[in-house]
Image (cartoon, grey):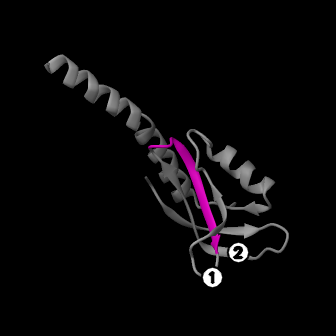
Amino acid sequence: MSRYTITVARTASRHSDPDAIIGYDRPLQTFFLQAFPDAEGGNLELWLGTALKEFETLSQLLSAAIARGFDFIPLASSIRHKLRDDHVREAHHVVSDTIIQDLINVTSAC
């Protein structure tokens, strides 16, 4: 799982969270975005990318954030490139494929 700190803004008020997290979750095969924790830090006002293959592209993630009244553009090109590289590298090594291969190896060894 990759995690990068970015700034997410509420589009209506332009209030921002400079410590928001964006990343790629390999087991869920989705990009995710977390922002605006409550005072205790336990709950997040914005948490996208919690389901399997929910956001397979950054564009899908951005559209979902905008639909909920948040924005994370401009996104630094260095972070955009790192996220793209994370996705390319990690999408080829999904957990389910690893588990299946382990089962095949155990079965063939018996």
Residue 39's tag is 1
Q: Quadrant of the C terminus?
A: top left
Report which quarter residue 20 is drawn in: bottom right
Which residue is more in the foreground, 2 or 42?
Answer: 42
- Residue at image location 61% in from the left, 70% down from the top: 43
Which residue is more in the foreground, 95 or 9?
Answer: 95
- Residue 30 on the magenta segment: yes
- Residue at image location 50% in from the left, 63% down from the top: 4
Report which quarter residue 77 is drawn in: bottom right
Which residue is more in the foreground, 85 or 28?
Answer: 28
- Residue 22 on the magenta segment: no
Q: Amino acid at mark 2?
A: Ser
Residue 93 visible (yes or no): no
Q: Main secondary structure of the magenta part?
A: strand
Q: Amino acid at mark 1?
A: Ala
Q: Does residue 51 sit above or below 65 in this rendering?
A: above
Extreme-right residue of the structure: 12
Q: Nearer the viewer, mark 1 or mark 2?
A: 1
Q: Which residues are drawn in magenta? A: 27-37
List x then y, in percent, for residue 63.
74, 49
List x then y, in percent, for residue 1.
43, 52
Q: Does residue 85 sit above or below 43 in this rendering?
A: above
* Residue position for label 2: 16
